[in-house]
Amino acid sequence: MSGRKITKEGEVRDADGNLIGKLTSGNLATLVGKTIDDNGYVVDNDDNKIGECTLLENIPEPEPEEPEEEEGPTAEEQEAAAKAESDRQLAEKMISILSQTLDRVKPVCKQIEEACEKADRTPKEELDEEKLVQTVKPLLEEGGRILQECNGAIRALDPDGRIAATAKARAASRDATPEEYQLADMIKELTETVIKTIDNGKRRIADMPHAKKKLNPLWGLLSEPLFQIIAAVGLLLNGVLGLVGRLLDGLGLGGLLNGLLGSLGLDKLINGLGLGSLTDALGLGKK
């Protein structure tokens, strides 16, 4: 390196521009362009050593830095994540069940409403109430079967009750997931479909003594499994019920839902399923 000069990068190169050494001691800012002596030193005019350069082969390789180990999640965090994933998958399964149920029950409810509306618009002297009963009764039975199948499918997701046993604690420990919001919206849609069908039907036949006598006891074929479905979902994903209650209140259906629960004695029935008062769970309260 003797006679070579230090570059502004702190390097020493031969006549062909090949890197042969580096400045390993001294202030680079003051040493750029200085010449190296036979010993690899840079000296000032008074022969004071002000820098030192070292051949590449004599510069030890820097030891590779060991990457810092990232701290993994704690056992509690892992458990919470596992439970959240389990709840997400559970919600997705219930969404699938409810989606199929809605596809099947909405046309049935539409037929019930159309039959009652047509009868309501028919002049009394031309109205055949027994024909209306014969039309609507099998539709109510079919709708009830569809809802009972839905209820059974949801309950089959937790045959031994283990999920239900911890649902309240899980709901209290985290925010609702997107899947739970979607599930709540589907329950809202199912509830809206069924209770509007019942409410409209009862109003349409209010002045039809025979139809009223025959059909009014049958509305429970729709409402009972509906509330059992809501309760079944609430037992597995407790936090969903509060979302459903807010959605129903937003539609102005909270009071109507309470009215159906009370008139059919279903609140006591639901109490026996382990949710306490369904209206309290839904956050609707008594109105």
Image (spheres, rainbow, N blue to C red):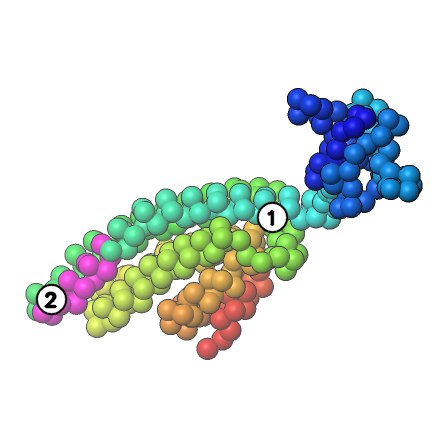
Instruction: Provide residue 279's location: percent of width, then percent of height.
Output: 50, 68
Which residue in the protein does label 2 denote? 122
In the image, residue 114 lies in the stretch drawn in magenta: yes
> Which element type, helix, strand or loop, lies under badge 1?
helix
Q: Write the start and end of the magenta stretch as one range.
A: 111-124
In the image, residue 130 lies in the stretch drawn in magenta: no
Residue found at the far bottom of this picture: 287
* Residue closest to the eye, 218 or 201: 201
Q: Is residue 92 left or right of residue 66?
A: left
Q: In the rendered image of this protein, does residue 38 appear above or below residue 7? A: above
**Magenta stretch, main secondary structure class:** helix
> Which element type, helix, strand or loop, lies under badge 2?
loop
Amino acid beneath label 2:
Thr
**Disc 1/disc 2 C-alpha distance (Å):** 55 Å
* Residue closest to the eye, 163 or 258: 163
* Residue closest to the eye, 179 or 244: 179
Q: Is residue 257 left or right of residue 53?
A: left
Amino acid beneath label 1:
Ala
Q: Residues within 10 Å of mark 1 (few under 14, many from 20)?
A: some
Give the image quarter of residue 192: bottom left
Determine the residue positioned at 26% across, 64% down: 201
Which residue in the protein does label 1 denote? 84
Determine the residue positioned at 39% across, 50% down: 147
Instruction: Provide residue 261's location: percent of width, then percent of height.
Output: 44, 67
Give the image quarter of residue 213: bottom left
Instruction: Provide residue 77's location: percent of width, then percent of height.
Output: 70, 48
Q: Could one spot residue 172 in this view of the protein?
A: yes
Q: Residues within 10 Å of mark 2 (few under 14, many from 20)?
A: few
